[in-house]
Amino acid sequence: QVQLVESGGGLVQAGGSLRLSCAASGRILSVNDMGWYRQAPGKQRELVAAITSGGSPNYADSVKGRFTISRDNAKRTVFLQMNSLKPEDTAVYYCNARIRNMDFATRNYWGQGTQVTVSQ
């Protein structure tokens, strides 16, 4: 089995920072693209940032200049550094990774989600 385990969410004041981490483990042959999505109450899940296995990032317009995605391929871990947080960044943040498992199947896997709350 493959698992994505997230950490780093919490409560922060507007203008503050948080760093999310997500580690992939289990029966993994290779990890391709990794990314972060978020879902606020009453809204659809949206892409926040993604990064290829080669390290090329892309960001939602709403977070450009404030969030930075990075990864450690040796540790199969992706990070999201979130600075200058705003109340509208409040959401459950989900890690996503496209993984080839040891059954030679490639599919998207999701973490359990971590709550980020930004107060005024």
Image (cartoon, rainbow, N blue to C red):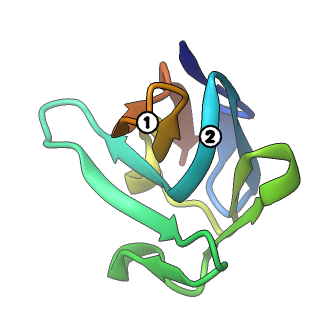
In the rendered image, residue 5, in percent from the top left (x then y), is placed at: 65, 24
Q: Amino acid at mark 2?
A: Leu
Which of 92 and 119 lies nearest the eye of the viewer? 92
Q: Secondary structure at mark 1?
A: loop
In the rendered image, residue 74, in percent from the top left (x then y), is placed at: 87, 53
Which of 5 and 85 lies nearest the eye of the viewer? 5
Q: Please state, as top left, top right, bottom left or bottom right, where the N terminus lies in the image.
A: top right
**Residue 34 in sight:** yes
Residue sitting at the far top: 1
Instruction: Give the side of residue 52 with respect to residue 21, left or right.
Output: left
Residue sitting at 85 percent across and 45 percent down? 75
In the rendered image, residue 51, in percent from the top left (x then y), is placed at: 55, 70
Q: Is residue 116 above or below residue 59?
A: above
Residue 29 is tagged as: 2
Residue sitting at 48 percent across and 19 percent down? 112
Residue sitting at 35 percent across and 82 percent down? 61
Q: Secondary structure at mark 2?
A: strand
Q: Which residue is mark 1?
A: 104
Residue sitting at 33 percent across and 39 percent down? 107
Name which of mark 2 and mark 1 comes first in the sequence: 2
Mark 2 is surrounded, within 10 Å at the Cα level, by few (under 14), some (14 to 19) or many (20 or more) other residues, namely few
Determine the CA span between mark 2 and mark 1.
Answer: 8 Å
Residue 41 is tagged as: none
The image quarter containing residue 72 is bottom right
Mark 2 and mark 1 in contact? Answer it, CB < 8 Å: yes
Report how many numbered discs are placed on residues in the image: 2
Which of 85 and 21 lies nearest the eye of the viewer? 21
**Residue 96 in sight:** no
Mark 1 is surrounded, within 10 Å at the Cα level, by few (under 14), some (14 to 19) or many (20 or more) other residues, namely few
